[in-house]
Image: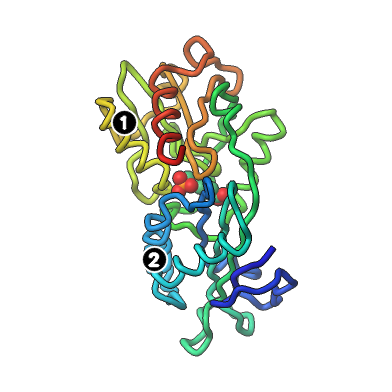
Amino acid sequence: SKILFNNEIIERNNIVDIEDRAYQFGDGIYEVIGVYNGTPLMLDEHMERLKRSAREIRLNLPEPTANLKRRLEELVSVNDLEEGIIYMQISRGIASREHYFPGDDVPPVTVAYTREEDRMTDVEDQGAKAVLADDIRWLRCDIKTLNLLPNAMAKQEAVENGAVEAILHRGNTVTEASASNVFMVKDGALYTHPADNYILNGITRKKLLQLASELGIKTHEETFTVDELLAADEVFVSATKLDVIPILKVDDHTIDNGLPGNITQKLVKAFRSLYE
Ligand code: PDD
């Protein structure tokens, strides 16, 4: 399949430069966008977040996001992608290795490719297990940067324990999961960590909060503790392409009766109706 490389759509080949700052420092930003029935979902929102991430790490985007957006749509089309994802990353560029930023003469490096991926409807319907892990990340988790080692380590722990996700906590406070946001339902109301520097403000998260309001479900962007999570009526995680995954068990602790909850199922359905 083809890739986007610095504003050109070309054949996929080995394009990594050993002094690309993404490679040496994780110095760059990225987005993962879901593609359903050949259409990228909430592409404008992803472009807005990309713009914000760029601003926060002081990276000058190579193109206005409107152009990037058009290029991504073109890529989906030339690759005939029906179901899957677009991955896009922008690195600060290629320069002689120094920790400080290179000068403005060094252009950023943009790469995007598509990947076919089936929908996770089985897990969405049946639910899955999660583990708890210490949130050892830095204090700017709101930026979608390429520095994902702590996330990768947490996800590995989940997978080794037969779980889909690692739910992270800073001290006693639940933040998010290794690659998704965490929600809980208590007494009919929906809770999720506020969109501050401790979490990535998920595009799926924002949409779910909106859908919940439309369904008449009370929503609270408030922190909650690990104990409150374990005592919740329902727990789920949300992310691009995962959509909504009910969490039935956290470590050895069963959430409520161990079945996908009512509100969770409503949100699974509401989210699906965005693209079905
Ligand atoms: N991850 N929190 C973290 C740490 C994430 O990495 C992600 C997404 C989310 C959910 O964000 P969104 O709803 O915008 O996808 C929350 C992507 C999918 C990834 O790294 O593969």
The residue under the point 59% across, 46% down is 83
Q: Quadrant of residue 273?
A: top left
Amino acid bearing label 2:
Lys
Secondary structure of the residue carrying tag 2 is helix
- Residue 170 in sight in this render: no
The residue under the point 52% across, 46% down is 36
Q: Quadrant of residue 59?
A: bottom left
**Which residue is label 2 attached to?**
51
| Residue 181, placed above or below residue 73 | above
| Residue 69, placed above or below residue 107 | above
| Viewer-closest of 149 and 36 | 36
Residue 165 position, x and y percent, is 58, 35
Secondary structure of the residue carrying tag 1 is helix
Task: Of the two numbered discs 2 and 1 on the same chain, state the one appearing first in sequence.
Answer: 2
Question: In this rendering, which labeled residue sits more in front, label 2 or label 1?
Answer: 1
Q: Quadrant of residue 174?
A: top left
**Which residue is label 1 attached to?**
212
